[in-house]
């Protein structure tokens, strides 16, 4: 073997190798990714040269072969790329590779652990794991001499002739003793599937191809089927539920970016603070999360983003303020919004199917990002009690009426309404006549069922805002956005349209000189004996008073919200407000009976008459039932409720 040259690599920092070996990377394993990427580049360059007519004869089949020799402690990466001439080895390896290594080390050794991608180290990253690196290469160029280059990790190298007779390059690493894990087949397979799975060249090891190769995100969406996308999702996230929707990103201006983002079904146990979108750079895996690039509200999305324009050798904090990265984030949110809008207008049923999960992204995004809000504001929908066919026609004006406009709009909106959803605008338009700029909502269909029923009976429409984000963030946000609109929870106040003037209640009792209403109020106040319960007497409008609740607990909106906010800030569950309203329904026969009971008795001796006592017990009971409809009981409340139920029932049966 003729030694062509011995020499020193032209670098100025003598300690570059120790730095590369020890401190630069915590992540030594990326050397394989770098060497495989170089091989893929070399193969595509040969292909391009061939297409340009620069290669005489056929070019070899593109492939990269990995092999290990446990005895010699070597790992080699062999490719059928364009190879290098002696001059090229001198230039690209001795000068370019090492001078850029030096630059890299100097620039990043301080912040190395914080770097997002550790990219661009290239060839010399081999020295992180090898004590000796050899290159055996033959260029495709006519008359080229095969070359053998070797370096033992000092700036000294040796260049000699090689007997190689196939075009391409083989890099052989003699591993350091503490890096022998890279001789293990399982480790090699794992590294290839992590970092180089989607390289477009087959990577062969132990006689088989071990990478997937097909990078779906680089393909044209027109050529892909639904099954292709689903299959790819299953490949990326095995054993997960099917995604709801996906967006294929594809742009080359003002930055290059490809990707596929999936909306997963949201699970309560998903950690939304850590993204699950995988970041690639030219099909090479960089990171399995990229919070710095994806807008925060899209964090639960999954999939792949691939862009050579994302700066990877900067710290994570620098990345967030990078201009291109910010533009990429805007681009992604816009594409997501566009996709949702197209599903909304093209397939309303599909939109509703996904809505429960998608709503959280969309609402959170609207709160966080003004631009995103503008993009999605027309497709925010809410579950409603409104049923188009049930709405009495008489209540609707025939001409120029907003409700009619809404219901006669294009197909998708109708489909959304048919499925029990509405937009805020449609709600407000529809209810303009009865309660302009006023929205009634329910946050819990179980505990607020009585209230919802009452509203529904009177034909009033209620929207459901029943997720965590709704109550704590989204309603206040909507109120800021629509300052003239008032949001009232069904249990905070009864809308005047639900009440009527009860003539009987206004009749003055000649004995006491008080109206019936006043007597009922007094009776309940005495029975409950709790100054924090504000008793109010009203009459609920109904054709069948027996069907209405005899009493209801109301939690005034402003007071309840203050409590909710305090609980949120203290990270506690909201306890039931001590101060609340008990609205007693004077038109309910039970209330009338209780009043009669309390009055119509003969007072025996000094004590209270048995029927007055029963009336008091019944007041307490009516209150308990109202409370139960609102929030259930605590242990103490439950005990006294049961005790009193039994005693009331006993008393009632005594009378029979
Ligand atoms: N397998 C190979 N076949 C042919 N040429 C190679 C091979 N590996 C490296 N080279 C040459 O050596 C040069 C330096 O490689 P190195 O990996 O250090 O940097 P790079 O690939 O140019 O850039 P990057 O820093 O992004 O990896 C390459 O540009 C290429 O010309």
Image (spheres, grey):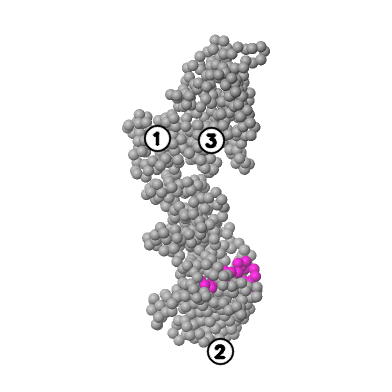
Mark on residue 1?
A: 2
Residue 259 visible (yes or no): no
| CA gap, disc 1 and disc 3 | 27 Å
Residue at image x 66%, y 15%? 607
Left or right: 112, with 359 as reference point: right
Quarter of the figure with residue 630 = top right
**Image position, residue 267 (x, y; %):** 53, 50
Residue at far right of view: 606
Q: Which mark's residue is nearer the viewer, 1 or 3?
A: 3
**Image position, residue 466 (x, y; %):** 51, 40
Q: Is mark 1 on a helix, strand or loop?
A: helix
Q: Name the residue under label 1.
A: 430
Exactly how many numbered labels are in the figure? Answer: 3
Would you place residue 322 above or below residue 634 in this image?
below
| CA gap, disc 3 and disc 2 | 88 Å
Taking depth in this image into account, of 615 and 649 the one nearest to the observer is 649
Q: What element carries label 2?
A: loop
> Looking at the rendering, in which quadrant would you find the N terminus?
bottom right
Mark on residue 447?
A: 3
Residue at far left of view: 399
């Amino acid at each position: 073997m003729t030694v062509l040259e011995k020499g020193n690599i032209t670098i100025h920092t003598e300690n570059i190798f120790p730095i590369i070996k020890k401190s630069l990377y915590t992540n030594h394993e990326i050397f394989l990714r770098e060497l495989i990427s170089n091989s893929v580049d070399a193969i595509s360059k040969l292909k391009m040269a061939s297409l340009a007519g620069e290669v005489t004869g056929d070019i070899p089949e593109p492939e990269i072969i990995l092999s290990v020799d446990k005895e010699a402690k070597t790992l080699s990466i062999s490719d059928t790329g364009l190879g290098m001439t002696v001059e090229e080895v001198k230039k690209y390896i001795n000068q370019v590779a090492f001078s850029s290594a030096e630059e890299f080390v100097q620039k990043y050794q301080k912040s190395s652990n914080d770097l997002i991608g550790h990219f661009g180290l290239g060839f010399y990253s081999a020295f992180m794991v090898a004590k000796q690196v050899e290159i055996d290469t033959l260029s495709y160029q006519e008359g080229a001499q095969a070359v053998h280059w070797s370096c033992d990790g000092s700036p000294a190298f040796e260049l000699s002739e090689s007997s190689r007779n196939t075009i391409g390059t083989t890099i052989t690493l003699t591993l350091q003793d503490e890096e022998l894990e890279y001789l293990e087949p399982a480790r090699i397979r794992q590294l290839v599937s992590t970092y180089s799975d989607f390289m477009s060249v087959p990577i062969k090891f132990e006689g088989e191809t071990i990478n997937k190769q097909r990078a779906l995100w680089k393909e044209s969406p027109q050529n892909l089927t639904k099954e292709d996308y689903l299959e790819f999702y299953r490949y990326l996230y095995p054993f997960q539920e099917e995604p709801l929707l996906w967006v294929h990103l594809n742009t080359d201006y003002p930055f290059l970016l490809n990707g596929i983002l999936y909306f997963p079904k949201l699970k309560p146990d998903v950690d939304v603070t850590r993204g699950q979108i995988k970041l690639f750079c030219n099909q090479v895996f960089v990171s399995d999360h990229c919070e710095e690039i994806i807008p925060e509200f899209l964090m639960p999305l999954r999939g792949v983003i691939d862009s050579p324009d994302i700066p990877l050798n900067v710290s994570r904090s620098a990345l967030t303020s990078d201009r291109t990265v910010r533009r990429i984030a805007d681009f992604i949110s816009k594409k997501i919004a566009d996709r949702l809008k197209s599903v909304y207008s093209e397939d309303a049923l599909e939109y509703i199917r996904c809505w429960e999960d998608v709503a959280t992204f969309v609402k959170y995004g609207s709160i966080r990002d003004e631009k995103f809000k503008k993009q999605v504001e027309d497709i925010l929908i809410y579950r409603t009690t409104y049923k188009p066919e049930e709405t009495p026609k008489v209540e609707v004006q025939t001409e120029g009426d907003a409700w009619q406009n809404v219901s006669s709009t294009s197909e998708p909106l109708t489909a959304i309404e048919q499925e029990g959803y509405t937009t805020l605008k449609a709600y407000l338009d529809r209810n303009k006549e009865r309660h302009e700029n006023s929205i009634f909502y329910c946050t819990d269909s179980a505990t607020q069922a009585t209230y919802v029923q009452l509203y529904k009976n009177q034909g009033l429409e209620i929207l459901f805002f029943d997720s965590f984000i709704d109550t704590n963030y989204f309603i206040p946000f909507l109120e800021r956005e629509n300052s003239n609109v008032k949001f009232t929870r069904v249990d905070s106040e009864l809308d005047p349209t639900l009440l009527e003037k009860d003539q009987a209640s206004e009749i003055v009792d000649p004995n006491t000189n008080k109206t019936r209403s006043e007597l009922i109020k007094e009776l309940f106040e005495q029975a409950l004996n709790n100054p924090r319960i504000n008793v109010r007497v009203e009459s609920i409008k109904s054709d069948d008073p027996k069907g209405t609740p005899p009493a209801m607990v109301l939690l005034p909106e402003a007071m309840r919200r203050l409590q909710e906010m305090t609980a949120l800030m203290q990270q506690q569950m909201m306890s039931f407000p001590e101060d609340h309203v008990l609205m007693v329904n004077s038109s309910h026969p039970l209330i009338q009976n209780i009043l009669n009971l309390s009055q119509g008795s003969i007072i025996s001796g000094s004590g209270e008459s048995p029927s007055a006592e029963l009336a008091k017990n019944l007041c307490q009971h009516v209150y308990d039932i109202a409370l139960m409809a609102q929030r259930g009981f605590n242990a103490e409340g439950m005990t006294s409720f049961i005790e009193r139920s039994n005693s009331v029932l006993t008393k009632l049966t005594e009378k029979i």
